[in-house]
Image (cartoon, helix red, strand yellow):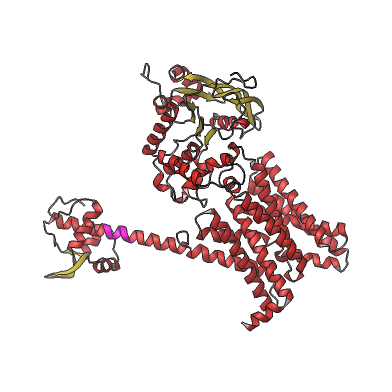
Amino acid sequence: MSALADLLASGIVRTVLMGAAMLGAISGMLGAFAVLRRQSLLGDALSHAALPGVCLGFIIAGTRDLGSILLGAFVTGALAALAMMLIVRRTTLKTDAALGIVLSVFFAVGVVLLSWVQGQGGAASAGLASFLFGQAAAILRSDLWIMGGVGLAALALVLALWKEFKLVSFDADFARAQGFPVTVLEAALTVMVALAIVVGLQLVGVVLMVALLIAPAAAARQWTRTLGPMVALSAALGAASGAAGALVSATTRGLATGPVVVLVATAIVVISLLVAPERGLIWQALAARRARARISDGRLLKTLQGLAAAHHDANYPAEQGMLEAALGTRAPSARFAALERRGLIHPVTHPPETTPHWELTTAGHAEAAALSGKPDDPKGGGQT
Amino acid sequence: MHDETLHEPDQALHIEDITVSYGATPALWDIDLDIPPGVMCAIVGPNGAGKSTLIKTALGLVRPVAGHVRFLGRPVGQMRGKIGYVPQRHSVDWDFPTTVRDVVEMGLYHQLGWVRRPGAQARAKALAALAELGMQDYADRQISQLSGGQQQRVFIARALVQDAPILILDEPLAGVDAATEAVIIALLQRLRDEGRTIIVVHHDLTTVQSYFDWLVMMNVRIIAQGPMTEVYTPENLRAAYGRQLAMIATPAEGRDM
């Protein structure tokens, strides 16, 4: 613990930690809406499109002035969003194609500008490349105030327009028919996502920023059933990924913060996809197995019941091999054992035969009857 | 009282000269349509006839090239919240993290106004609307757990909760089970008997005569409109459906309505 305390005593580490956590919370909260609106990749286009803005901001300001760089990033990001909207509305191209075009064109322009700026030389221009993958150590205490401001504004907006954002995310057509200004609401959400990306550029960089939008939301969806908890959990997971990533990279030499934050967030997603109750893959596989076992047990009991009825003998001993043949499958012997444990069937011998035989117990008869909804009557018709 | 600002106030829905075009081909061509209050009207036509486009245009979701729309004499902008709209069930993501009651309360968001959240009163209204459709026991269910018929009932409850004088439904019976169909039709007919206007995009010609009392037949243009007995004729069906007709249905001559 003392190592951690030493670490936190360092001003730079504290700043990076708080910055990463705040960024994670903001992008987690807004990313939840983006994912639900099926616009996760819009974030990717926006962040890639921020690169030419970063370079233009540098060129116009003539120095590495954060204000003009972030403003440039926001402007080109907004232009990209606008271009995409126009392509989707005015041409026959679908959203994915429009995204692909806009993302690569803006990013290509950004890389061209970046190499040109670097070719011009100058000490300040060297730092620009850090916007590709982020450079956490470059974060200043004053940047935290910008992040906090963006975060509070996003939180206030989401709280005030909670039901409107929910309605627009779920059913935009219905919202429009009700008279809500859907375009304005959707634009508000998109602008907030763009702001989150811009403040995250320094830390995570344009290439990986999208992961911080999508990953916390995707993980949170696995654990929650309603929107409120999902958005809250998404923000919490984003903050946790940011903090954990910052700590890991601070304690290990040569690990860049941004990518580590993204890897932590992705690890949370993988765990959530696997183990979350109801929606997790493992949970679903177990549920499917339980259902299969229940059905095969039911068929086994019904077959035994039918044989007992056909032979007018409630304790008719049925040979295991014959049961398997009647069921058309080799029922795993584990199923026989499981049913025996539940007290529904009972192993018997049937001399002179040496093979295993089974008979229904009283409880087994009741269970088989309950399956068909008919009263227990071993002397009844022999249908199964 | 006669309000000079109203245009055709005696019609629940009045559409004049509406043309809608996606690209070069018109989806709707010069539509003139009047649906009087208090009827249960079916809009029928072959696939691609523009049925959904027609109601989306009426609701202001699609912008027409020309023409205008009035509900009870008013433009749709003045009627927000007074028209219950049930979109096609497949238009939304049913895996959205929300509950049945929450979806139904969305029908009340317009009345609540900005910023205000639904409270106990909204909750009671939502539960009452769900009960009308036999869905009261599902109020706290996740919407992802619903069957197709249950999804449709929830969507209708969301429109019902508005207590609107006009209801517009887009294919409410598509892909639902027989029990749900019976519940929905009984409810819509009761709402009609209370004096509301029900407008339904319908795809099943075999049931249209028994469920509805007013009919609009269209295929990009309006083929015929009016009371069911006058409009549901072999000539009109041929005009709307052309060759497809033989495969769909033939109207029984002199069938008693």
Q: Position of residue A118 (x, y in %)?
A: 84, 64
Which quarter of the rendering shows the C terminus of chain B? top left
Q: Is residue A220 magenta?
A: no
On screen, residue A267 versus residue A156, left or right, reads left
> Would you place residue A99 above or below residue A223 in this image?
above
Q: Is residue A297 magenta?
A: yes
> Would you place residue B67 above or below residue B103 in this image?
above
Q: Position of residue B96 (x, y in %)?
A: 52, 50
On screen, residue A298 versus residue B124, left or right, reads left
On screen, residue A29 versus residue B104, left or right, reads right
Is residue B109 at all visible to an observer of this figure? yes
- Between B203 and A57, the one lying in front of the other is A57
- Between B159 and A191, the one lying in front of the other is B159
> Would you place residue B178 above or below residue B257 in this image?
below
Q: Position of residue A287 (x, y in %)?
A: 39, 61
| Res. A32 image quadrant | bottom right
Residue at coordinates 64% horizontally, 83% vertically from top-left? A2
On screen, residue A372 versus residue B238, left or right, reads left
Magenta range: A293-298
Q: Position of residue A272 (x, y in %)?
A: 52, 64
Residue at coordinates 82% horizontally, 62% vertically from top-left? A115
> Would you place residue A151 above or below residue B236 in this image?
below
Q: Residue furthest bottom?
A: A2
- Between A72 and A166, the one lying in front of the other is A166
Which quarter of the rendering shows the N terminus of chain B? top right
Report the predominant secondary structure element of the magenta stretch: helix
Is residue A52 at all visible to an observer of this figure? no
The mark total stands at 0
Residue at coordinates 28% horizontally, 60% vertically from top-left? A297
- Between B60 and A60, the one lying in front of the other is B60
